[in-house]
Image (cartoon, rainbow, N blue to C red):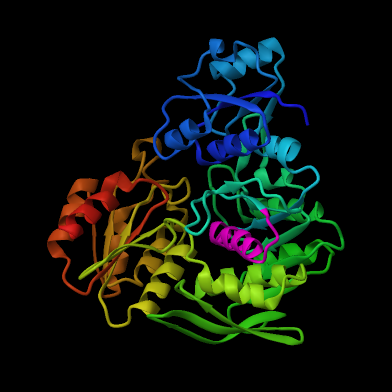
Amino acid sequence: MNPRTVHLTAIGGVGMTSLAGLLVALGHRVRGSDLDVYPPASDQLAALGVPVARGYAAENLTPRPDLLVMGNAIRMDNPEAVEARRRGIPTLSMPEALEMLVLPERTPLVVAGTHGKTTSSSFLAWLLETAGRKPGWFIGGAPLDLPAGYHLGDGAEFVLEGDEYDSAYFDKGPKFLHYRPAGVVLTSVEFDHADIYRDLDHVKSSFARLLVLLPDAAPLAVSAEFPHAVEVARSSGRGFATFSASGEADWYADDLTDGPDGLRFVLHGPGEQIAIRSPLLGRMNVRNLVGVAVLARLLQVPATAVQRAAETFHGVRRRQQIVVDGDVTLIDDFAHHPTAIDGTLAAVRDRYPGRRVWALFDPRSNTTRRRIFQQQIADALSGADVVRIGPVDRADQLASDDRFSPEDACARISERGRQARSAADHERLADGVLDEARPGDVIVVMSNGAFGGVLARLEAGLAT
């Protein structure tokens, strides 16, 4: 492929920064623009030698690029979008750019689902790397064992985290529809992303469209623990293997223990048993490991490579990541859906039996800001002994009858005998936790964003 000049509008996003790295590795000339770019993205782009213009302006497209790639936060009235249309500059969404420039002549392996796809795709990339297959990958997170969330790789396989979120203002389909799947792990299907999906049926239809793209002979592993995932797979009319963290599936985990030394279980599949050890915690991660192991075995990756990879895989930043391990343990987690909250708190309970568990929750995502999961979030948070809920992000943009109520959630949690309070601001929340925490406590911070600096404030306070 001849080198091209590619301009990335909204280059500071995680996915766009990773795309820039892949394009540089392919020999393209890359530049970009954004309102602001912060570390680690700014450091990564500087190391790549990618110039970044601050702010969006028509003149950023001079000299004229061969291609323009637009992040999905960009609206059609953005000055660069307007200028690109006026000048007829070919414009792609980020997943389209991957499809056109990165995936040809590769074997794309897509990990999709409402939950667990970042951890699962990271483990799949690590497993293939450990097995010596030299994969490429594109992951929407920061794997702890890999040098970055992206890598071009020299082998045939290319691992992609299959995001169901929309692609661009001109491309409203989910990103994974551009990924040419040659193998899929479907981790789960539940309602989420209330800003773009009408209801559960709408969500299911997107995953169904993904499976239509999968060749008949390609491997498909589907979690038996999520009925809607199985329903989507069955409706595709194709064959698939089911997996579970405990029984009732083609592949399942048995003899599970979770202790200070990590997870231990036996993976049972047709005609084989594989003993697995892992430093990760919780049943939800057993499910993630099992789903990837199933796809790997269907791809003829040796069982010994699966064992070796599981034992040396430490997960992903912000997914049950222990950031302080002292008298008080502080854990950073991305959970922002009741199923994920419940799974994370259950995992913490198993790993730290008998200790007081705190759950600090940030109602920030476009789903959790709304009342859609009002009761379910409260019930999931009741898995902790002490609960603190921060202010609803961008609360003024929602009508009161549509907005999640921290106060109502705390009342419901308190009815279950837990201590629960809402906080009017993030600083007060963090300072209150530091005042009340005692040796032996485990504090879990759950947010898909910055949570107003709560984690950083706690980390600094607990380190003193």
> Most extreme residue toward the right, as rendered?
216
Q: Residue 379: x and y, percent?
A: 39, 68
Closest to the observer, 315 or 416: 315
Closest to the observer, 162 or 142: 142
Q: Which residues are magenta?
A: 115-135
* Residue at (42, 40) in percent of width and height: 40
Does residue 121 show up magenta in the picture? yes
Using residue 236 as the reference point, say whether residue 111 is left or right of it: left
Vertical side of 390 occupied by 87: above or below = above
Instruction: Report the magenta stretch's main SS.
Output: helix
Please indicate, yes or no, whether residue 309 appears anywhere in the rendered image. Answer: yes
* Residue at (68, 47) in percent of width and height: 176
Q: Quadrant of residue 452?
A: top left
Using residue 347 as the reference point, say whether residue 174 is left or right of it: right
Does residue 79 show up magenta in the picture? no
Please indicate, yes or no, whether residue 12 appears anywhere in the rendered image. Answer: no
Q: Residue 134: x and y, percent?
A: 68, 56
Q: Residue 30: x and y, percent?
A: 60, 26
Q: Quadrant of residue 374?
A: bottom left
Q: Residue 11: x and y, percent?
A: 53, 30
Figure disc tally = 0
Quadrant location of the N terminus in the rendered image: top right
Using residue 307 as the reference point, say whether residue 33 is left or right of it: left
* Residue at (48, 34) in percent of width and height: 47
Closest to the observer, 414 or 441: 441
Quadrant location of the C terminus in the rendered image: bottom left
Vertical side of 240 occupied by 459: above or below = above
Using residue 123 as the reference point, say whether residue 332 is left or right of it: left
> Most extreme residue toward the bottom, as rendered?
255
